[in-house]
Image: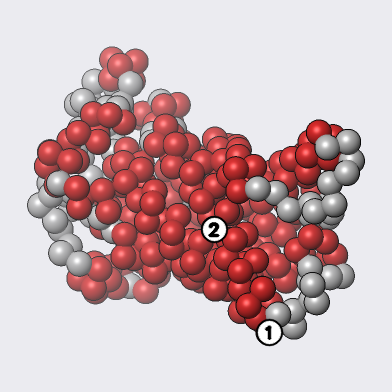
């Protein structure tokens, strides 16, 4: 197949990235809401931490199943998609920017815009490409990430009835800089996270291709992978990346919701300027909530990350191939 022009290639990557991001976000929204509810809780969730930190009462959410039941009972099915509109407004441009920048960097490194040529790049270039692409996407879509976190964490009764009211209040109380609260730990986390996600995804794809060639005795001419193997590669890549970078995601969420008034039944709120900086937040969480505090929400996060990566990568690959066949 003839290589598409630069403009067509950018259109393919942007559109495929936006579609894949929208699909994966909508499918995994319930797990994201549960994860955020755990991450913004100040109260310890483990029995060990409760015994040693008697200044805190039992947290509202103590387990994934219990949290699911409580959210459904108190907020109904719609509660699991709370904050989904700003999340879509974040994820669609995020993935569009991410995949577009990623393809540009890989094209520059490989000297070709053909996707099949990119798989042969070294693992180091795959990691670096993913990290740079994610940084660009994060800066471009971050305010929607902050709004998503605030709306998903507020529970009932609502503090903000919609995205517009949240946006107006944030600008009024924190200024425009408030829309980027928590950006520093996000960028610190996104470099290893995206590097691991895209680097391990390419590595797993190479392993899968080698396995297919081995099984067929080297007779496989088409190196494209079936959707099942693409899902497994995305699943493994997302799990590895989330497990390593989760503590910084907890810190980011705390900065995003600081000063947010919530109903007392959801526990103590994160006070305004509760943390001086990212390092101070890590230390305070560790001191007050133990190591478990840095991994609050890790179970729904990993459960969410795996299908998110799988759905994103599979949707991107299929949408990209479909658009390429139409436009070229």
Sequence-wise first label, 2 or 1: 1
- Residue displayed at 58% across by 54% down: 313
- Residue displayed at 36% across by 29% down: 289
Give the alpha-carbon distance from disc 2 to disc 1, as whole Å.
Answer: 21 Å
Mark 2: which secondary structure? helix
Image quadrant holding the C terminus, namely: bottom right
Q: Is residue 141 left or right of residue 107?
A: left
What numbered label is drawn on residue 122? none
Say which quarter of the image contains residue 51: top left
User: In this view of the protein, can residue 98 be seen by the observer?
Assistant: no
Work out whether residue 119 or residue 249 is closer to the camera in this orientation and state it.
119
Q: Is residue 20 left or right of residue 7?
A: left
Image quadrant holding the N terminus, namely: bottom right
Say which quarter of the image contains residue 160: bottom left
Q: Position of residue 258 (x, y in %)?
A: 30, 53
Q: Position of residue 88 (x, y in %)?
A: 38, 64
Q: Position of residue 168 (x, y in %)?
A: 24, 74
Q: Compared to 288, does 238 lie above or below? A: below
What numbered label is drawn on residue 315? 2
Q: Position of residue 55 (x, y in %)?
A: 22, 25
Q: Which residue is mark 1?
A: 7
């Amino acid at each position: 197949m003839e290589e598409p022009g630069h403009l067509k290639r950018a259109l393919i990557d942007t559109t495929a990235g936006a579609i894949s991001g929208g699909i994966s976000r909508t499918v995994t929204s319930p797990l994201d809401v549960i994860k955020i509810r755990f991450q913004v809780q100040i109260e310890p969730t483990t029995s060990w931490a409760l015994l040693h930190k008697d200044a805190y009462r039992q947290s509202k959410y103590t387990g994934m199943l219990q949290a699911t039941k409580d959210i459904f009972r108190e907020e109904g099915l719609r509660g699991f998609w709370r904050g989904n509109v700003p999340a879509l407004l974040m994820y669609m441009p995020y993935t569009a920017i991410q995949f577009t920048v990623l393809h540009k960097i890989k094209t520059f490194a490989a000297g070709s815009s053909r996707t099949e040529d990119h798989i042969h790049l070294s693992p180091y270039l795959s990691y670096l490409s993913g990290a740079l692409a994610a940084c660009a996407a994060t800066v471009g879509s971050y305010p929607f990430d902050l709004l998503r976190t605030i709306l998903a964490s507020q529970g009932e009764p609502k503090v903000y009835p919609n995205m517009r009211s949240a946006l107006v209040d944030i600008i009024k109380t924190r200024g425009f800089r408030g829309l980027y609260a928590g950006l520093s730990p996000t960028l610190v986390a996104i470099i290893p996270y995206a590097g691991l996600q895209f680097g391990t995804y390419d590595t797993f794809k190479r392993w899968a291709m080698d396995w297919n060639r081995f099984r067929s005795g080297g007779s496989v001419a088409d190196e494209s992978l079936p959707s099942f193997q693409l899902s497994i590669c995305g699943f493994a890549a997302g799990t590895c990346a989330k497990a390593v970078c989760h503590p910084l995601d907890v810190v980011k969420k705390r900065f995003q919701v600081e000063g947010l008034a919530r109903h007392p039944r959801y526990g103590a709120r994160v006070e305004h300027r509760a943390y001086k900086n990212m390092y101070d937040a890590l230390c305070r969480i560790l001191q007050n909530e133990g190591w478990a505090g840095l991994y609050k929400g890790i179970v729904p996060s990993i459960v969410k990350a795996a299908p998110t990566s799988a759905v994103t990568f599979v949707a991107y690959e299929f949408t990209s191939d479909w658009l390429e066949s139409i436009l070229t």
